Image: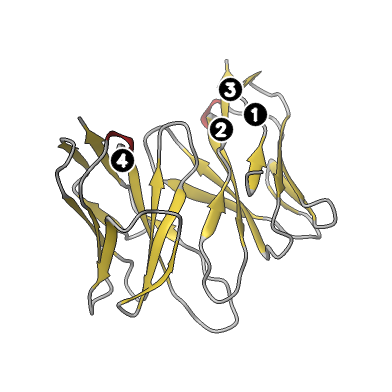
Amino acid sequence: ETGVTQSPTHLIKTRGQQVTLRCSSQSGHNTVSWYQQALGQGPQFIFQYYREEENGRGNFPPRFSGLQFPNYSSELNVNALELDDSALYLCASSLTGRGTYNEQFFGPGTRLTVL
Amino acid sequence: RKEVEQDPGPFNVPEGATVAFNCTYSNSASQSFFWYRQDCRKEPKLLMSVYSSGNEDGRFTAQLNRASQYISLLIRDSKLSDSATYLCVVNAYSGNTPLVFGKGTRLSVIA
């Protein structure tokens, strides 16, 4: 196991509602990245948090927002849910350090269904 | 053009077969390359990193051709447990840039 946990594991919402997904990073990691994986697709980068600041964002609208806390855990918030938001949401934790690439370890994901 | 493109699949092969996955990437600045494995309804897991010199891990061999922007994964002597989706992943390292995933190629190994 990677030591990265996510909650909840499954969630059903209706269009227009808001949702908060949570991620606890691996011990010692300071960076959390969020990805959306639609059915039959590869994961797509939403955004990344490093030391409580957003540190890069993919092609997702502003209704996707996030937070990182002092203990490096993170939340993903989605407002005004749309049917196309139905997907597996993955968080990945890593340690950002100068001059090296550090492996991203994925959590088990939260499966969101929007009806 | 998608940043990372893979064979569409699915691949259905008998046990013991050799299977090859191909992948191309569009960003010539990409620095790090990986193959991830994803089982049904599970998270992606790193299978192996890919180096220009090529690398092997048991039955798995990965190759990178930077000039052609092409990555491959070869699985020899396929096992039933190899059934999964294989994701080609690149990272344009400049600090801590995100992973860019291909769509994945599904492999089913049949007894």
Residue nearer the viewer, B27 or B58: B27
Chain ID, mark 4: A
Cβ atoms at labels 2 and 1 below 8 Å apart: yes
Residue at which label 4 appears: A85
Residue at which label 1 appears: B78
Amino acid under label 3?
Val
Badge 1 crowding class, 10 Å Cα cut-off, few under 14, some 14 to 19, many 20 or more, is many
- Same chain letter for marks 4 and 1: no
Please tell me whether residue A35 is drawn above or below residue A53 in the rendered image: above
Question: Which secondary structure lies at badge 2?
Answer: helix
Residue nearer the viewer, B100 or B12: B100
Furthest residue to the top?
Answer: B111
Question: Which secondary structure lies at badge 3?
Answer: strand
Mark positioned earlier in the residue sequence (3 or 2): 2
Question: Which secondary structure lies at badge 1?
Answer: loop
Chain ID, mark 2: B
Q: From mark 2 to mark 1, how far is it between C-alphas?
A: 6 Å
Residue at which label 3 appears: B109
